[in-house]
Image (cartoon, rainbow, N blue to C red):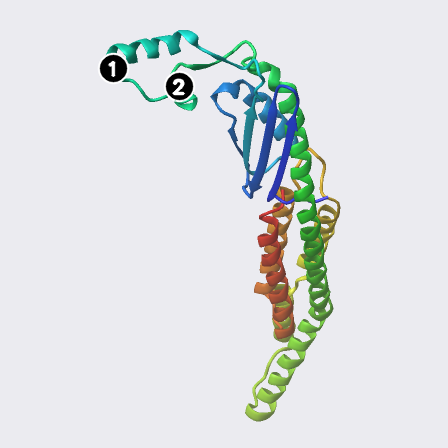
Amino acid sequence: MLLSMTGFGEARVQDERWSVSVEIRSVNNRHLKLTCKVGDRYAAFEPEIERLVRAAVRRGTVQFVLRIDSPSSADSYRVNRVAIDSYRSQLEDAFGAKIRRPVLLAAILSLPGVVETNRATAGDDSADAWPAVETSVREALDRFNESRAREGLAMQAEALALGRTIHHHLEVVAELAPAVVAGYRDRLLERVRFLIEERGSTIQAADLVREVAIFSDRSDVAEEVTRLRAHLEQYAQVAGAGVGAEEAAGRKLEFIVQEMGREANTMGSKAGDVAISRAVFEIKGALEKIRELIQNIE
């Protein structure tokens, strides 16, 4: 199975102490580049998060975002009576009997130091959040890979179709190639007859044989056709089934397509026939489309 390097996955887990949200998104890259945003308080989780991501992703620029909240309970906060008394005392000293308006409760609670977090009950022990974080990361990675697999399926179909296009035009080349030398020989003989009949020139048979042999050797594409067929078989195998978990299919396909391009270029330079040149042109066009496609295959 081929995987796209473009994907998105998210997950949310909440228990009695933690509310965890994870988002993973990626775009294509020749190597794996991982950026984690976890916050200073949970920086200790980053190595383990990176291990989980690297086990599931081999190539691409991956952005990982972790958000953690600790739901508040009735015991999470307390009112600082000392601070309230201090504010009241200072106001009375400053204004004395001039204070006549009623004091709003919201105004009192908004004063610095009046409401304090009870750290003993507010989930300050961040290490306890790891089980919820790990569950969220694994679920997000599963959804992330599901999205990449869906896109990879469409890319796989296109890659195989392009491979069949190359195979079709390669068979055209293989069918036309033997006739190229024969056609050149016939055209050469026709020119020789013209020179003999019209100008009285004399040409040795050995010269004709040598000229045809040189052209045959220069335009012979049999080896290139054979090698390109072998590359196509390997390409179809990798594109059709992917490769093992230890290797990225996209990287393997890049190498195969590079080798296919070399054979196509050699055939194009040897082509001594218009129809063969056209077939090679179609092969090169399909290879270029494959190159663009596999830029986004892991």
Q: Is residue 110 left or right of residue 259?
A: left
Q: Which of disc 1 and disc 2 is earlier in sequence?
A: 1
Residue 266 in sight here: no
Q: Position of residue 134 (x, y in %)?
A: 65, 24
Position of residue 160 measured from the top left corner of the image (x, y, whole percent): 71, 55
The residue nearer to you, when weighing 284 against 202, is 284
Is residue 145 in view? yes
For disc 2, the marked residue is 108
Q: In this orientation, which residue lies closer to the viewer: 29 or 139?
A: 139
Question: Marks 1 and 2: in contact by CB < 8 Å?
Answer: no
Q: Position of residue 179 (x, y in %)?
A: 71, 73
Is 129 placed left or right of 164 in the picture? left
Residue 229 appears in which quarter of the rendering? bottom right
Residue that numbered label 1 is attached to: 95
* Relative vertical location of residue 280 with respect to residue 230 in this rendering, above or below: below
Q: Residue 27: which quarter of the image?
A: top right
| Name of the residue lying farthest toward the top | 82
Quadrant the N terminus occupies: top right
Query: Which residue does the image show at 63% across and 66% down from the upper left?
Result: 282
Q: How many marks?
A: 2
In the picture, the disc for residue 68 is none
Tell me the crowding category of disc 2: few under 14, some 14 to 19, or many 20 or more residues within 10 angstroms, Cα based: some
- Residue 95 position (above or below residue 262): above
